[in-house]
Image (cartoon, grey):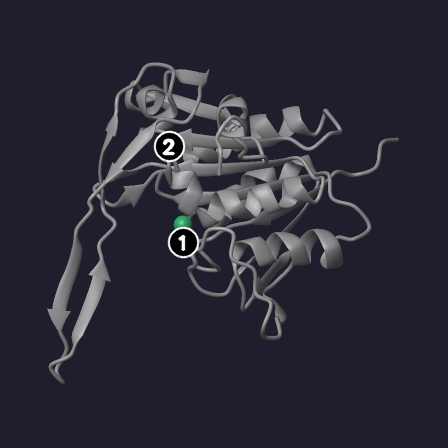
Amino acid sequence: MAREKRILVVNDDGLHGEGLAPLREALAPLGKVTAIVPERERSAASHCLTLHKPLRLKPHGPGLYAINGTPADCARIGVLHLMRSGVDLVVSGINRGHNMGSDVIYSGTVAAASEAAMLGVPAVAVSQGLKGGKGDYRAAAAFAVRVAQRLLKGPKRPVLLNVNVPALPPESVKGWKTVRLGERLYDQNVAVRRDPRGDHYFWMAGRWVRGRDLPGTDISAVRAGYISVTPLALDPTDVAALPKVAAWRF
Ligand code: MN
């Protein structure tokens, strides 16, 4: 008999992230599910690693642990320590809000999955769109199961997928599309205020304004009611620019 599959769940919304329980419950029938998440929300933590203070792993019930670290820390502690006898798949999420286009640069959800992929474990990041600030995680949880079932079959080499689910009830989701990253446009305002002592402080709103609706991208697929699936590379080299830069005289 094949041994039970071992799945590591991580996130960046932390222990109280609302997408955590739906994901753990949905994946449970596939094998042994262990979750390690930050003890507080670390959204937009990107690929930050905690190198200069001790990390503590605290159990919070069966198969659930929190650490005083980042999403990428969770993936490392999970793969290299807690599940060192073997991890078949890492699922990151379900994030509260999309991670499309250039969001993947900032996203802790995507970083946790990419850290796992860098450690040689197939990984998928799953993010759910919000409507009026609320998330319906049913479609995302169901699709995470389908992706997990597929990734558990192989390939054995590292694979990293980024999945975004539209803010729709499951029956209204039209299907899924494999697409490239789109372009997110952010609010570029930095708010400057004065604190009670008269000193300036800054508040980076970083609010997403709109996405360019380019065909074949995650943004356009999600806007049209489809789940987007984007394979991500771990090597950001701009291969097309290599010969051009090689010809420059520095
Ligand atoms: Mn988040």
Foreground tag (2 vs 1): 2
Residue at position x 73%, y 38% in the image = 88
The secondary element bearing badge 2 is classed as loop
Question: Residue 98: percent from the left, percent from the top?
Answer: 36, 38
Q: In screen coordinates, is 52 left or right of 45? A: right
Q: Is residue 197 above or below residue 231?
A: below
Queried on whether the Cβ of the residue with tag 1 lies below 8 angstroms from ligand 1, the answer reads: yes
Which residue is situated farthest in the front direction here? 249
> Residue sitting at 65 percent across and 59 percent down?
62
Which residue is under mark 2?
101
Between 112 and 67, the one nearer to me in the picture = 112
Q: Which kind of residue does numbered mark 2 sit on?
A: Gly
**Image spot of residue 242 (x, y percent):** 54, 26
Residue under the image location 44 percent in, 17 percent down = 177
Front in this rendered view, residue 64 or 207: 207
**Mark 2 or mark 1, which has the lower sequence index?**
1
Residue where numbered disc 1 is placed:
43
Q: Give the residue at the far bottom of this rendering.
A: 197
**What is the three-letter code of the residue carrying label 1?**
Ser
42 relative to 214, above or below: below
